[in-house]
Amino acid sequence: MGNLLKVLTCTEFEQGPNFFLDFENAQPTDGEREVWNQVNSVLQESESILGGLQSYKGAGQEIRDAIQNPSDHSLQEKAWNSVCPLVIKLKRFYSFSLKLEKALQSLLESLTCPPLTPTQHLEREQALAKQFAEILHFTLRFDELKMRNPAIQNDFSYYRRTISRNQINNMNPDVGRVGRLFLLSSGNKPEALWLFLHPQLDIENEVNNEMANRMSLFYAEATPMLKTLSNATTSFVTENKTLPLENTTDCLSTMASVCKVMLETPEYSSRFSSEDTLLFCMRVMVGVIILYDHVHPNGAFNKSSKIDMKGCIKVLKDQPADNVEGLLNALKFTTKHLNDETTPKNIRTMLHSL
C-alpha cells in the first residue's frame, strides 16, 4: 500500500475525506521528523507495557492468606513482599499514561495548527497520523486487558490499606535501609512487625501517599487510558483558546471517516499486508469516536455530528463478534453522550442490540 491511497469515487459521502491513511508504511517527512521522534520514543515502550500488563498475575492468594490470618506475621510479610513489586509495576503503567498524554497533545498540536486544515494535515502528515492511531490502538488494548484483570485493583487496594494503617518508626541501625518498622493493627492492639524489603525496593520513595492517591484515581476507572486521553484532548482544547474547536473535532471526525471507509471497502482493505491492520483500524475508529464525543459539545451521536455513527456501528457489526465485543462495550460505556435525548433512538437501539 502506498503512502497515500486516493479514492477513485466518493459518491456515497460527497463531503467525506478523499484519501486513506497508510497505517502500515507511512514514514515521516523532514517536517514531521521532530515531533515524530518525540512521540516515537514514547511508543517504543508500549509493547513492553502491554506485555507487563498481560503477564500480571496479582497477589490474590497471599493477600487472602494475610487477611484470614491477621496475627500470623510470616503471612503478613509474604503478602507485603508479594504486593510491593506489583505496585512498582502499576506505577510504571501509570507513569506511561502521563507520557502518552503529552505525546497525544503534541500530535494534536501538529495536526490541527493553521494554516492547513485538519484534513490537509492528515493527508500530508501521514506518519504523525499513524502515530496518533498507534496511541489509540495501544489505549484500547491496554484497557481491554485491564478490565479483565481485577487483581490490579485488589492488589493496589491492599497496598493502600496497609500503608494507611502503618506508621513508620525510626530505622533500626541493625537493619539498615532494607527494613522498615510497620505497626500493623490487629484489633485494638498494634503489633510490631519488621517487613524486610529488597534493598532496591524502597517502596516508601517509589510510591508515596501523593503518588498512591493519583494512581488510585487512575485505576478506579474502568478504562483508565481512554479516560487519560479524553482528559488530555479536553485539556488541549481548553488551553488552546485561540484554536477553533472545529480544528480538533474535524481532525477526529476525519480519522473516523477514513477508518470506516477503509474497513467497509474490500478494494482497499484487501490491500493490507496483515489482517491485524483491520483490527487496528477498528480500534482507531472507536478511539477517535470516543474522543470526539468527549470534546464536542453535542457529542458524536447527535444528528449534527460529522461522524457517520450508523455506518461506523454497522462496520463493527459486520466483523467477528470476538474482535469487536470490547470495542462495542467501549462505545456503550465510555462515551459521554450516547444516552442524551438528542441521540437518535435507532442509534441507541442499534448499538445496544449488538
Image (spheres, rainbow, N blue to C red):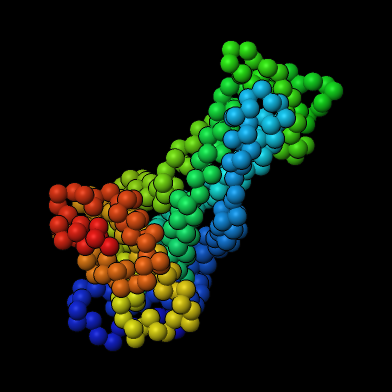
Residue 149 placement (x, y as % from top left): 50, 49
Quadrant occupied by the C terminus:
bottom left
Please identify the residue farthest to the right as the structure is shown: 174
In front here: 9 or 310?
310
93 w.r.t. 9: above or below: above
Tell me the quarter of the picture where residue 43 sits. bottom right
Relative side of 200 to 29, left or right = right
344 w.r.t. 265: above or below: above
* Residue occupying image coordinates x 61% and y 18%: 186
Tell me the quarter of the picture where residue 199 sits. top right
Residue 327 placement (x, y as % from top left): 37, 60
Can you see residue 34? no
Residue 266 placement (x, y as % from top left): 34, 83
Number of on-image labels: 0
In front here: 307 or 144?
144
Residue 55 placement (x, y as % from top left): 60, 55
* Residue occupying image coordinates x 44% and y 84%: 1
In front here: 333 or 70?
70
21 w.r.t. 1: above or below: above
311 w.r.t. 94: above or below: below
Please identify the residue farthest to the top as the structure is shown: 188
* Residue occupying image coordinates x 59% and y 45%: 58
Can you see residue 183? yes
